[in-house]
Image (cartoon, helix red, strand yellow):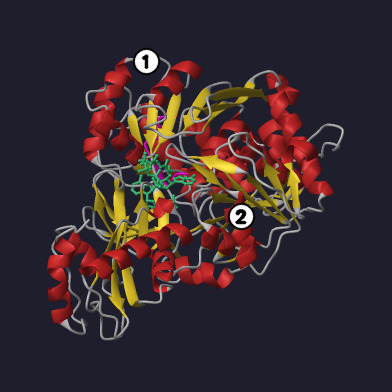
């Protein structure tokens, strides 16, 4: 039986689909506009939809200035908590505004204008968030690149975004080692045809770096005598706030464009109505600013809400132990926390009986949210038993910027069904389709799609590539956005997201492309062809495995093969980054393919995972697949 609140939520979702203009027009009041939008949705040019086309605003103003004006100047906006450096530092809204306005001035003085791009390649330090907000302040478009990516990935993003300025740091600090960022940045710029005019570098005391001709020291340019603060530059709601590159199936990352007005409205609405966080409350999101979760729920949503956000430089385990999240919650009084299931699995592995959970006072915690990969019922159960608060799965993607499906605890809590992120939320008309584009009955798996238009905050297109936007997402089923995930809906409308239907990998909540790993492997002189598949892993959800075929005439003995496999693992670390976590490479005679030459990655993945393998009738030579069976079934590493 549903409660009044649940029924009212279901009605709201239905109303948001039946009359999006009314629903989002009302939600738009949560944001301060310079020119309030008269039009809510421009649907005159499908499949390209635009939200609040005639509205003008500044997202940084909404995240900082308006809170300072309205009495939150002395409230903590951001808490930097860094067990890896032994630092905790709090910034009030007034202090954060001062730093952001100054860095906006620095960028302006370096020639960054409205619409220009700024690449941010940073570890989890406050300067990363300051640089993002400074871009928003002056109408520049930031493109944050995850600090774990190696030169080739960074170069691809610099080449595509063509930044005027790159903001970076001298080093990142991983539990096991200090990573010099500057050589990675220099190498990426060397590889990229586009060269930024300047790089602003935060010198960290753990490892400083030499600065070259185009480089500037953050501390020097930020000195109050060196720069005048920047004012907020008005932008159209439809102007891009950022471009965030994500992995497709090819080696070329997709530049997800995020608009300004729709994003601000959707995030502000979601923070209270979905996540249940109110202005003035403290929230922990243990992601990284390099991922979409970090953009939306470390930086923008909590600040747009006037909440306090924790920026955590550390890991769920090993910095120093599996109690680190619980310490953060106790010390800073967080009312809710958000992380990835893999983080909980890592904590569970080290603290199975929850001794460290009991060691902290978690009385402020109301909810734990988990996203980034499928939340397996065992992990859900463990977290629920240990924490005694609702553990809420939520499903979304870089493309959407905020949840597609979630149990909306901020409005009404529904029954939790382990394995399901619950119900599609406002604005998302989710349908599960079969190969012919027909909706499947409840309980039947198919391609999860969203009927257009997508709600505010979701991608309007890909950076400078409308064509790829259409071919990647909108061409499979006319009038629908293809999520790339497969799954089903139950009789009550609960969605079950079972995994990608394409070759995108999800390693410890990090989205990686098979294509970029394969490109790195194929660059080795001994490799004729190769395939990467994602296989199930009890900690990381998935880990990549590589199968390589050697060039004709290369005949290696056991030692030579081992050496080559080690070289290939290293190549992927050097080209893509250690986050790819490729540990296992097997040299094989041939790869199974269809007659048209498509490598049967999915079939190999099913064999490696011990599932029933679906072998397409178009397979070229079934004996190749048979020969691979023992290799795939026996992990050699
Ligand atoms: N900069 C440089 N290197 C990085 C990095 C960064 N920002 N992040 C990770 N790496 C490196 C690590 O040092 C490690 O290198 P190694 O192979 O030399 O040890 C490698 O990349 C893999 O790191 P990681 O994915 O963190 O795996 P792990 O085994 O060290 O830790 C977990 C496992 C589960 C604790 C970790 O993956 C984790 O915290 N996951 C949560 C992910 C998350 O929050 N995702 C966001 C989606 S919501
Ligand atoms: P990213 O764009 O990096 O956020 O990755 C998005 C992908 O991660 C989705 O397409 C899903 O495959 C997966 N994903 C994210 N959250 C969930 C979830 N709650 N349940 C299942 N899969 C998820």
Give, as a single range, the part of the protein colored magenta: 402-411
The disc, 1 or 2, on the residue closer to the chain's N-terminal end is 2
Judge the density around disc 2: few (<14), some (14-19), many (≥20) Cα neighbours within 10 Å: many
Question: Can you see residue 258?
Answer: no
Q: Tell me: 292 left or right of 300.
A: left
On screen, residue 152 above or below 343: below
Q: Is residue 314 magenta?
A: no
Picture quadrant of residue 89:
top right
Q: Quadrant of the N terminus?
A: top left
Q: Position of residue 451 (x, y in %)?
A: 44, 59
- Foreground of the two, 407 or 253: 253
On screen, residue 357 above or below 479: above
Name the residue tied to disc 2.
185
Are dots 1 and 2 in contact, CB under 8 Å? no
- Foreground of the two, 176 or 335: 176
Q: Position of residue 157 (x, y in %)?
A: 58, 61
Question: Can you see residue 286?
Answer: yes
On screen, residue 161 above or below 324: below
Q: Quadrant of the C terminus?
A: bottom left
Element on which disc 1 rests: loop
Name the residue tied to disc 1.
360
Q: Main secondary structure of the magenta part?
A: loop
Q: Position of residue 252 (x, y in %)?
A: 50, 67
Residue drawn 48% across and 29% down?
284
């Amino acid at each position: 039986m549903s409660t009044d609140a649940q029924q009212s939520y279901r009605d709201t979702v239905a109303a948001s689909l039946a009359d999006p203009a009314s629903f989002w027009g009302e939600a738009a009041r949560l944001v301060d506009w310079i020119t309030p939008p008269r039009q809510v949705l421009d649907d005159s040019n499908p499949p390209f939809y635009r939200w609040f086309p005639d509205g003008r605003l500044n997202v940084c103003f909404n995240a900082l200035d308006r809170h300072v004006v309205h009495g939150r100047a002395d409230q903590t906006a951001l808490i930097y908590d860094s067990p890896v450096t032994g630092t905790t530092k709090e910034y009030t809204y007034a202090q954060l505004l001062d730093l952001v306005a100054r860095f906006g001035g620095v960028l302006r003085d370096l020639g960054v204008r409205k619409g220009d791009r700024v690449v941010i390649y940073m570890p989890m330090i406050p300067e990363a968030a300051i640089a993002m907000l400074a871009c928003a302040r002056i109408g520049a478009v930031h493109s944050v690149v995850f600090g774990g990516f190696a030169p080739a990935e960074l170069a691809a993003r610099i080449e595509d975004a063509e930044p005027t300025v790159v903001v970076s740091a001298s080093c990142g600090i991983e539990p096991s080692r200090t990573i010099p960022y500057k050589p990675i940045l220099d190498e990426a710029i060397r590889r990229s045809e586009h060269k930024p005019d300047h790089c602003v570098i935060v010198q960290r005391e753990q490892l400083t770096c030499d600065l070259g001709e185009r480089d500037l020291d953050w501390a020097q340019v930020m000195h109050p005598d060196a720069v005048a603060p920047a004012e907020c530059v008005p932008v159209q709601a439809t102007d891009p706030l950022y471009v965030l590159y994500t992995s497709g199936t090819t080696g070329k990352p997709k530049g997800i464009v995020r608009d300004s007005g729709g994003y601000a409205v959707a995030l502000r609405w979601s923070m209270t109505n979905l996540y249940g966080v109110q202005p003035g409350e403290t929230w922990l999101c243990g992601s990284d600013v390099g991922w979409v979760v970090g953009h939306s729920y470390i930086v923008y949503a909590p600040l747009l809400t006037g909440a306090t956000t924790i920026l955590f430089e550390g890991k769920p385990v090993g910095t120093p132990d599996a109690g680190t999240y619980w310490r953060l919650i106790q010390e800073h009084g967080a009312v809710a926390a958000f992380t990835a299931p893999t983080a909980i699995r890592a904590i569970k592995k080290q603290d199975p009986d929850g001794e460290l959970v009991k060691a902290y006072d978690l009385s402020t915690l109301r909810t734990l949210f988990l996203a980034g990969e499928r939340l397996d019922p065992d992990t859900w159960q463990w977290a629920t038993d240990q924490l005694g608060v609702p553990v809420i799965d939520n499903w979304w993607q870089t493309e959407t910027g905020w949840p597609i499906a979630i149990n909306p605890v901020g409005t009404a809590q529904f029954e939790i069904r382990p394995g399901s992120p619950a119900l599609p939320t406002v604005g998302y008309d989710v349908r599960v389709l079969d190969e012919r584009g027909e909706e499947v009955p409840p309980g039947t798996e198919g391609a999860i799609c969203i009927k257009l238009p997508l709600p505010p905050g979701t991608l309007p297109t890909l950076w400078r590539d409308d064509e790829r936007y259409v071919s990647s997402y909108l061409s499979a089923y006319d009038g629908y956005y293809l999520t790339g995930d497969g799954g089903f809906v139950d009789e009550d409308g609960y969605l079950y997201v079972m995994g990608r239907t394409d070759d995108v990998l999800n390693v410890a909540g990090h989205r990686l492309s098979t294509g970029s790993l394969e490109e790195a492997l194929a660059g080795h002189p001994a490799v004729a062809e190769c395939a990467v598949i994602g296989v199930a892993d009890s900690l990381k959800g998935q880990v990549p495995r590589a199968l390589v075929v050697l060039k004709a005439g290369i005949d290696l003995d056991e030692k030579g093969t081992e050496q080559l496999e080690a070289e290939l693992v290293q190549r992927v670390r050097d080209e893509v980054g250690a986050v790819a976590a490729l540990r296992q490479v097997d040299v094989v005679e041939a790869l199974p393919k269809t007659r048209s030459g498509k490598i049967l990655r999915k079939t190999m993945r099913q064999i490696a995972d011990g599932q029933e393998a679906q072998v397409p009738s178009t397979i070229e030579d079934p004996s190749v697949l048979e020969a691979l069976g023992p290799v795939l079934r026996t992990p050699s590493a």
